[in-house]
Image: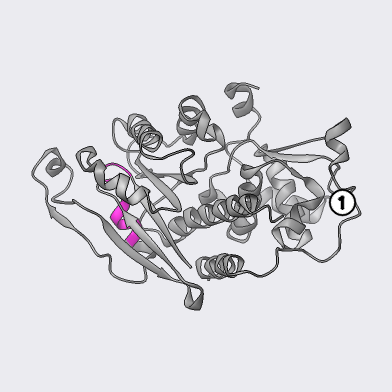
Amino acid sequence: MEWRILFLGPVGAGKTQAIQTISDIEVVSTEERATDATALIKENTTVAMDMGLMNIGDAGRIILYGAPGQERFDFMWEILLDQTQGIVILVNHASNDSLAALGSYITALRRLTVGAPPPFVVAITHTDEGEVTDLNEYRRYLHTHADDMGGSKIPVFRTDAREKRDIRNVLLALTAMLEFDERARLAVF
Amino acid sequence: MNATDSFALVNHAPDWHSLHHSIQTTAPRWTPPPGLAKLREWPDLAAVPEEFVAPVARICALLWNKPTAIHLISRILGADRAETHHALQMLQTFGFIEMFSVQGAEQQHLPAPGTEPEAPAEPAKTGFSSFIGKLRQRLLG
C-alpha cells in the first residue's frame, strides 16, 4: 500500500523540517531563493513541493509531501490534496497571525476538497518562542470556525518540527484516524 | 453544550504521571460502565507519557470517529484490556472523554457488558490492517 500525507502551512511553519525529521531519505526539495516578503523570513522557500519517504518494509510506504506556503501557489495544494489520504496543518505560533493562518487553511480545505476533507491534525510549532502557548485558543478557533470538520475534536498538538517524537506523535494520531475512518467506511468493527 | 462549557470540563494541565501512579497504587480494578464513551477533545500528545501515547491516540481516534460502547473499546482496538482501561480512566478523569449511559431504543443496539469475547478481535488480517499495524510499529519502533 501507499499513502500520501500532505504537510500544509504558511512559510516558516516547519513543513520541510518536519518531513526531514521523519523521512528515511533526504527530502527532495524544490527550493528557490525567496524574492518576495518570504525573504524577510528565510532565504529559500519551497516553490512546488517537498517530498520525503517512510518505508514500511514489504507492507508499503508513506510519501510525505510538503506544499509551498505562499497562497499564490495554491494550485499545487489542489493537485497534492487530490492524492492525499491525510493532512498535517502546521501553524507557526510565534507569528503575529497564527489564528488567521489556521483559518486560511481551513478555508482552503473547504474550497479545494469535494465533500469532507481527509482527516487532519493541527500541529502548533515554534511554541518555544514568543508568548506562552495556550492550545485552547486554537481549539476554540476550530470549534467556532471549523465545526463542520469536527470543531474542537480536531487534534491540536504542540509540535517541534525538529523532534522525531513530536512528528511521530502527529503521524500516530493521523494513522489512527485514517484507520478508523477506513474501518467505518468498510463497516469493519 | 457550548464550547465554553466543554472547555471548562477538560483539565488542560493534566498531571499524567501522578494520575497514572495513583491509579496503579490506590484505585480498585476498574470495570467499564455500561454506556458510550465520547470524545470531547484530544489531549496534547506532547504531554502524554510515552507508554500511553499509542493507546491514547488510538482511543481518541476511535472516539473521534464515533461514540463507542465503553466495554467494547479494547476489543475494537485489538489491544490489551488492562492497558486500554487504564488509558480510558485517565482520559475520563481529565475530561478529554465523557462517558454516558444510553436509554431505550439506543441501548437495545448495544451488546450487553460481559458478552464480549475475552480475546481481542481485530478485523481479519487484510492488506490494509497489515499496513496499519506495520506503520504503527515503524512509528513506535
Give the residue at x 77% y 53%: B85
Q: Give the range drawn in magenta.
A: A9-19
Counting from the top left corner in percent of width and height, residue B102 is at 83, 34
- With respect to residue B128, does A38 lie above or below? above
Where, quadrant-wise, is the N terminus of chain B in this rendering? top right
Q: Which residue position holds label 1?
A: B28
Apparent side of residue B17 relative to residue A132 in the rendered image (left or right): right
Is residue B114 highlighted in magenta?
Answer: no
Give the residue at x 45% y 26%: A145
Report if residue A144 is visible in the image: yes
Counting from the top left corner in percent of width and height, residue B34 is at 86, 42
Counting from the top left corner in percent of width and height, residue B89 is at 75, 47
Report if residue A13 is visible in the image: no
Colouring of the image = one colour
Q: Dot 1: few (<14), some (14–19), or many (≥20) neighbours within 10 Å?
A: few
Relative to the observer, which residue lies in front, A125 or A141?
A141
Q: Quadrant of residue B129?
A: bottom right
Q: In which quarter of the image is residue B84?
A: bottom right
Q: Quadrant of residue B49?
A: bottom right
Relative to the observer, which residue lies in front, B24 or A122?
A122
- With respect to residue B9, does B133 lie above or below? below
Subunit of mark 1?
B
Total marks in image: 1
Q: Identify the amino acid type marked 1.
A: Pro
Give the residue at x 86% y 64%: B118
Kindly state the secondary structure of the residue where label 1 is placed: loop
Apparent side of residue A91 relative to residue A151 in the rendered image (left or right): left
- Residue pushed farthest bottom? A58
